[in-house]
Amino acid sequence: MQEIMEKARQLADLIVRSEEVDFYRRAEQQIKRSQKVQSLIAQIKRKQKELVHAKHLNKEQLAAQLEQELERLQDELDEIPIVAEFKESQLEINDLLQMVTNVIANTISEKIILSTGGDPLTGETGLMPLEDEKK
C-alpha cells in the first residue's frame, strides 16, 4: 500500500508540473492582480448576500432584481479574457484528472480480467481455480 501511495504522489508531482497547471497558476495570479476582476468579484459576493437576505425576508421583487444584477455582473466578469482563460484552464485540469482516473481504472480492470483468463472484449472475468483445486 505504501508503494502505491508513493507512486500516487509521484503522479501528483507530474501533474503539478504540467503545462495545464502552470497556465492555471499564471491565470490565477493575473486575476488576483486585476483590480477590475477583484472589484467585480466583491460586487458579486455582496449581491449574493443581499439576495440571500431578500429571499429570507420573502422580498420576491427585490430578489428578482438582485438576480438580474448578479447575472449582469457575472456576464461582465466572464467577458474579461483572463477570467475566460482561467475557467478554461480549470476545465482542462479537471479533464486531465478524469483521464488519469479512467486510465488507472481501465488498466486495473483489464489486468484483473486477463489474470483470471477472462475476455477483455466483454469485460467478463474468468474463473480462477480455488486454492484447493490447485493442489
Image: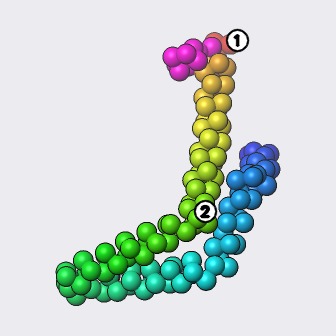
| Mark 1 or mark 2: whose residue is earlier in sequence | 2
Residue drawn 19% across and 80% down? 60
- Is residue 111 depicted above or below 61 in this figure? above
Viewer can see residue 9: no
Q: Does the magenta stretch include residue 85?
A: no
Looking at the picture, the colour scheme in use is rainbow
x, y (%) of residue 7? 78, 46
- Is residue 133 depicted above or below 9 in this figure? above
As helix, strand or loop, the secondary structure at mark 1 comes to loop
Q: In this view, does 64 lie to the left or right of 33?
A: left
Image quarter (top left, top right, bottom left or bottom right) of the C terminus: top right
Q: How many labels does the image show?
A: 2
Q: Which of 129 and 123 is in front in this view?
A: 123
Residue drawn 63% across and 25% down? 110
Q: What stretch is highlighted in magenta?
A: 117-126
Q: In the rendering, which numbered label is found on residue 135?
A: 1
x, y (%) of residue 14? 78, 50
Would you say the magenta stretch is mainly helix, strand or loop?
A: loop
Distance (Cα) linking label 1 and label 2: 61 Å
Quickly name the residue at label 2. 86
Nearer mark to the viewer, of 1 and 2 = 2
Q: What residue type is labelled 1?
A: Lys
Q: Is residue 23 left or right of residue 74?
A: right
As helix, strand or loop, the secondary structure at mark 2 comes to helix
Q: Which of 53 and 84 is in front in this view?
A: 84
x, y (%) of residue 56? 25, 84
Residue drawn 24% across and 84% down? 62
Q: Tags 1 and 2 in contact by the CB under 8 Å rule?
A: no
Q: Which amino acid does label 2 sit on?
A: Phe
